[in-house]
Image: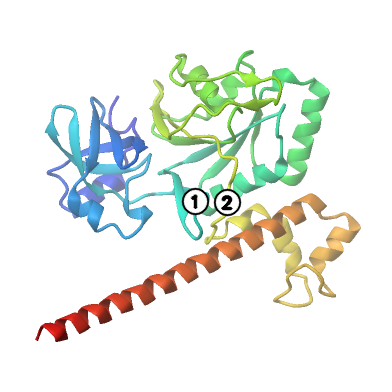
Amino acid sequence: MDYQHLGYTDSLEKYRNEQGLEGFEIGRVMLEHKERYVVQTPTTEYDAELVGILRFTARDRYDFPAVGDWVAFSEYDEGKALIHAVYPRSSIIERQAVGTSGQVQIIATNIDYALIVQAVNRDFSINRLERYLTICNASGVEAVIILSKIDLIEDAELESMLSQIRDRIKDIPVLPLSNPAQTGLDSVRKLIQSGKTYCLLGSSGVGKSTLINSLTGKELMETAAISESVDRGKHITSHRELVVLEEGGIIIDNPGMREVGITDSSGGLEMTFDAILKLAEDCKYKDCTHTSEAGCAVLEALDTGVLDAASYENYQKMEKEKAFFESTVEEKKKKDKDLGKLIKHYKKVRKKDKY
């Protein structure tokens, strides 16, 4: 294995030279857990942490390393390292941080392709597929849908599901897969290119870890049986982890995500629901909300059946979610600004009192 197998590029090397980072080693973050990191080079794995100045000057979550990042580090003991800098990211897949208003959670960085895995036998949902697709579009990451566990349903039911997906989601590859039967595994393998990074997205129990085990031919990831009583996958993967395949591709496994909160500030929704946006061009009013206005081309398409009602409802829900997230971000910025002014005033008063 060499740096190219890990995904290192000429643009990263250019940045390294421009920033004077030649004196540090180069590595990629394989695993992250509470500001402790596993950093991989072609020959060695290091247990790493941040240097103090990097930790204390971080303004927000984006300044900390995430799984998939390239970092400059130095070894201070055998297998121990300090991270001094994070290289620029080509992409960031993120969602709203669960339970925290106005904040994001970085899922993975420097991703080339997202493999959206959904099982056919449990909470199959095209709405959820559209959510995953939106965070991929917002990140500029190409998506592929993998419909897993097809051995658990009849062929006719599978064809019906594939038809439903293709009616709602255009121009995105959909690959049926059965890990136990190895059906469709060759199609997934053909996607994998040396030096490219693939991120697995999906709920718990849909077969993401099993897929990694199938691709590597090893039991790298722990898996668990499905509870027959509730038909719900046990949550096994508890952290993000980067795996390098022998053929050179890189796969990032993720904990199952039951909530996929939309942050989208870069057109992800517009790309996912481009059919609605094209219809909106013919609306009577430029500021049409597509909810009750006369002359709304979107509502007309909905009434005539040209536009899928479920897709429209999902779009409206995510649009409101995006607007709420953006408002909470602005509110947080204002509070931080007001707090900064208060601290500055307090310091000024204290200084006067001293003299």
Q: In screen coordinates, is 337 left or right of 211?
A: left
Q: Secondary structure at mark 1?
A: loop
Q: Amino acid at mark 2?
A: Gly
Instruction: Specify the quadrant that holds the N terminus.
Output: top left
Q: Is residue 297 left or right of residue 22?
A: right
Residue 183 drawn above or below residue 57: above
**Residue that numbered label 1 is attached to:** 97
Task: Identify the image quadrant of residue 48.
Answer: top left
Q: Give the tally of numbered discs.
A: 2
- The label on residue 261 is 2
| The C terminus: image quadrant | bottom left
76 lies left or right of 219: left
The earlier-in-sequence mark between 2 and 1 is 1
Q: x, y (%) of residue 330?
A: 48, 70
Residue 90 in view in this figure: yes
Whether residue 170 is visible, yes or no, is: no
Query: What is the x, y in percent for residue 99?
Result: 52, 51
- Mark 2 and mark 1 in contact? Answer it, CB < 8 Å: yes
Q: Residue furthest left?
A: 355
Pick the residue in front: 178 or 7.
178
* Residue at image coords 55%, 47%: 136
Mark 2 vs mark 1, CA separation in Å:
8 Å
Label 2 packing within 10 angstroms: few (<14), some (14-19), many (20+) = many
Residue 303 placement (x, y as % from top left)? 89, 60
Residue 239 x/y as whole percent:
43, 34
> Which mark, by number, is residue 14?
none
Q: Amino acid at mark 1?
A: Ala
